Amino acid sequence: MSFAKLTVTALVAAAASASAATARDAVRIVGSSTVFPYSQAASEEFANQTGAPAPIVESLGTGGGFQAFCGGIGEGFADITGASRAIKKSEFDLCAGNGVTDITEALIGFDGLSMALSRTNDFDWDMTLAEVYQALGAQVEVDGEWVDNPFQTWDEINPDFPAVDIVVIGPPPTSGTRDAFVEIAMHAGCEELDYVKNGGFDGDWVEENCSRMRTDGPFIEAGENDNLIVQQLNANENAIGIFGYSFLYENLDALKGVKLNGVEPNLDTIGDQSYPVQRPLYFYVKNAHRGVIPNLQELIEEYVSDNALAPGGYLTERGLVPLSDARRAEMQENVISGKSMDGPES
Amino acid sequence: MTDINTDQAKAERFDWDGAEYSARVNKRKRSELRLKAIGLTAIAAALGMLFLLLSSLISTGYHAFTQTHIKFDVTYDPEFINPDNLARSDYRGLIREVMRENFPEATDDDLRMLSGILSNAAQFKIRDRIVEDPSLLGQTISLNIPVSDPYDQLNKGLINRDTPEQFRRVNDAEIAAFDVLVSRDVVTKPFNWALFTNADSRFPELAGLKGAIVGSFYALLICFALSFPIGIGAAIYLEEFAPRNKVSDLIEVNINNLAAVPSVVFGLLALAVFIGWFGMPRSAPFVGGMTLALMTLPTIIIATRAALKAVPPSIREAALGVGASKQQVVFGHVLPLAMPGILTGTIIGLAQALGETAPLLLIGMNAFITAAPSTPFDSSTALPTQIFIWADSPERGFVSRTSAAILVLLGFLIFMNAIAIFLRNRFERKW
């Protein structure tokens, strides 16, 4: 019967190519969804330039990336992982426990987190981080008391703001963007409040009490899809969205950034670190795979080359904010020579 | 007797034309009309939703089916081309030279901007031509080169020229340069074949579905190769040979339940067993196909059993009566007659598998890969996961490409379902 024949042929074909699958010839990159576009760009440029097999880039999130990266040494495990924060001690220990002791860290640049809204809104938004926290935190200070967030409209926080409902659309808790926003913007804003400043609370208290976003309505969790947030901002001119700077950069015709502490988000202010909400972007290389996985060393050289990372390079064209020339040169030397990193403090 | 008489009298006295009766008839007619109206509203609502979906997809997606190109004369000037290393010569410099010929008065800064009109692939397109045919050195050929995404958007009218300059992706000087090219009649907008012949790319103007289509094809092939024979085997045994007892009842209940298990569960199973224990490669269509086979199996078993059941007992009895063995009856008579029904069920199961996303995300088939797979063991994406990746990309051009990819996926689904309907109508036997 022809179906049986087809089936048998397919199985034979599958079995025949099984031997080809045993040796991996493409580099595997995993890690943060924020670093993903940059890894994409470096991989594509590398494959186009050299004709080598296209590297496989997977977006697993920073934590998921380290899980896959630190699983062990061998063809089944990733060679490079991207991260939107430095590696944690627990992750470094996980790596070491699985035999991955020789890791090189590469700081490739910075990424700004922007708050933005539709250009049809004509108010010139300029907030302090404390005001951001007051609008979004689950618990805030009111008349010297630490209470559930009562603010419903912007003018209740600062009389200069318009009297419109607070509507902020942001990423869900599973997102690295959310983690970074809480850690950088919310914690800093919380620490600026008089109650926290004068109360003598330590970092643990801030961690425990200032990490939760409010759940009573004004803060809306969108999905992981930042394009969806952009669409919602176009539909509601009073809604403010939170997302990576690259999405604001691509949509500057429809959206404008909210100034934070008087600084507008753009490539310059993120680059000189005057814009307060930004994070470093890294990738980590498993040195035991250098020279074993074909093309790994060449891909790394392409990734950290001036062509990619210098101002005007193709990664900066995608929204990456570059390092200073001196730091970049030092990083390039360390990464290409495969300098092993020391374990992080915490 | 008298009772019956009075009853008859009563019945005779009922007035069929009376107001009471016609009121009751009218009431029944009204309730029937109401039911019809509710049914029609339901259908209209469903059609409205479908129309909304399709019209929003088409209205955003149709832009992606064309791509702006510019026709240039390219001279392979030995100044830029190193004949000993054609693969890595200065093609960026060559493009700059092409732009200088077209805009003789441009400064160096202008030239950088002008080179940006062309897609990043221009250098590779120019390179590939001369690598293919080294005799082109020193010659001039005419090449059709795609423009980069912002200019493509501009040419399609998706960038509003009235927006203040600093908020636009292309500034006034860039628009002016592009308009000069338009006025020279070198700008064309042909059908975007790259959408089907290129694999994924970070540049929207180069991104295509080839990797995803080939990946989906391999995954479906593996899925078919596994689930079709196993599913039919299981169904034949259960339907024709298995004794009716508690064990077979239990198996039947389990199969019916499996058909309703959410697909993400199969993805987790595949991640733990196929990739975790057996050490199979991540992102491979082979593993994707096995995962989808797990999902499709119950559908095929149920469809096959229904088709076997529909073959009338007289066929079996006649065959047994002339001395055929049980096996001869099943494979010689029952199975061929049930085949159209089995195929219909299989195709519908495969169409479902084609659109399945969740299990593929878990086994890593949402990776970014710029080459199409050449075997089922190479890493690749599938159509639904490619849609997932594009929907998440910041570049504007991916908005229309996401819709276009959805339309392509819908096209494949409609095609597969049409085959299923054709097979059913063509071969189905009425008894």
Image (cartoon, rainbow, N blue to C red):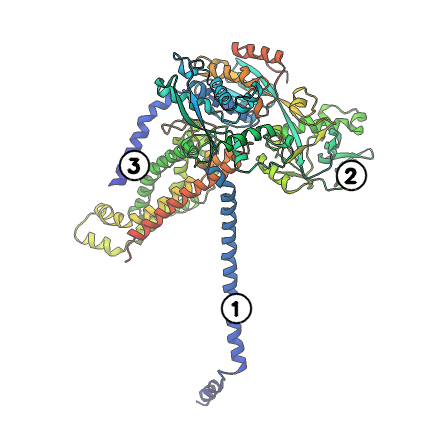
Amino acid type shown at disc 3: Thr
Q: Which residue is mark 2?
A: A155
Left or right: where A26 falls relative to A218 = left
Q: Which quarter of the image is occupied by the N terminus of chain B?
A: bottom left
From the viewer's side, name the closer residue of B6 and B368. B368
Front of the two marks 3 and 2: 2
Amino acid type shown at disc 1: Ser
From the viewer's side, name the closer residue of A162 and A34. A162
Q: CA distance from mark 3 to mark 1?
A: 56 Å
Q: Residues within 10 Å of mark 3 (few under 14, many from 20)?
A: some
The reply to whether the C-beta atoms of the residues labelled 2 and 1 are less than 8 Å apart is: no
Q: Is residue B356 above or below residue A283?
A: below
Residue A29 in the image: state x and y as whole percent: 49, 22
Amino acid type shown at disc 2: Asp
Residue B153 in the image: state x and y as whole percent: 54, 35
**Disc 3, SS:** helix
Residue B85 in the image: state x and y as whole percent: 40, 13
From the viewer's side, name the closer residue of B236 and B115. B115
Q: Which residue is mark 1?
A: B31
